[in-house]
Amino acid sequence: MPESNRYLISKTRNDVAIQLVDRAGNFKALAWIDLEDLEKVKPWRWYLSSHGYATTNIAGHTVKLHQLIMNRLAAGDGLEVDHKDRIRLNCRKNNLRIVTRSINMKNVALRKNNSSGVSGVYWNKRDQRWCAQIKDKEGKRLHLGLFKDKQDALNARVEAEQEYRYL
């Protein structure tokens, strides 16, 4: 069995970097936690998963570091732990929040083919206009309009986000 993880403690920032390894024990990445959570995570060997999460095995079950930190191992209530900054290895509590699956899925990076720089706004080639849309709480796509000016489409999207209480 590979040696235990190494922990780099920063007392000035009150956080800890966990050196993650692969199954062979080779260093792969750093995961960050609050200093107060060190004793909670120390009993286990932490690895970098193929999906980019810090994971371990507890009683035959794969457990993600952020779930352990937020006490969400077997909640069964349909809620999830979300990384606010979308950095999977930043497991400090001020970066984690408990949300519904729907909210968690809204906190994703823009697609590579996004033409506007904003989620829910895109160039409609057929109509030669900027299209704005949003999904409601049930996941139904709502058309917000077609706009000649990109800024008008962006404004419509921002107003809808406020109305539907996005993030």
Image: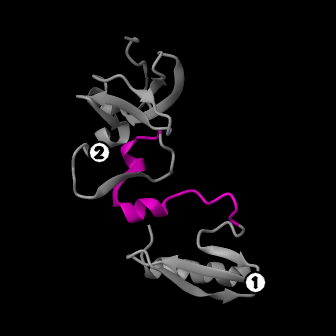
From this view, report whether residue 136 is shown above or below residue 17. below
From this view, report whether residue 23 is shown above or below residue 70. above
Left or right of residue 141: residue 63: left
Left or right of residue 40: residue 31: right
Per the image, the residue denoted by label 2 is 70
x then y, percent, for residue 115:
72, 68
**Residue 42 seen in the current view:** yes
Residue 88 magenta: no
Q: Earlier in the sequence, mark 1 or mark 2?
A: 2
Left or right of residue 113: residue 44: left
Between marks 1 and 2 in the image, the one whose residue lies nearer the viewer: 1
In the rendered image, which quarter is residue 127 located in? bottom right
In the rendered image, which quarter is residue 157 located in? bottom right
In the rendered image, which quarter is residue 42 located in? top left
Q: Residues within 10 Å of mark 2 (few under 14, many from 20)?
A: some
Residue 97 magenta: yes
- Number of labelled discs? 2
Q: Amino acid at mark 2?
A: Met
From this view, report whether residue 40 is shown above or below residue 106. above
- Highlighted magenta segment, given as a residue range: 89-114
Q: Circle 2 sits in a helix, a strand or a loop, which is it?
A: loop
Per the image, the residue denoted by label 1 is 126
Q: Amino acid at mark 1?
A: Arg
x then y, percent, for residue 60:
26, 29
Dots 1 and 2: beta carbons under 8 Å?
Answer: no
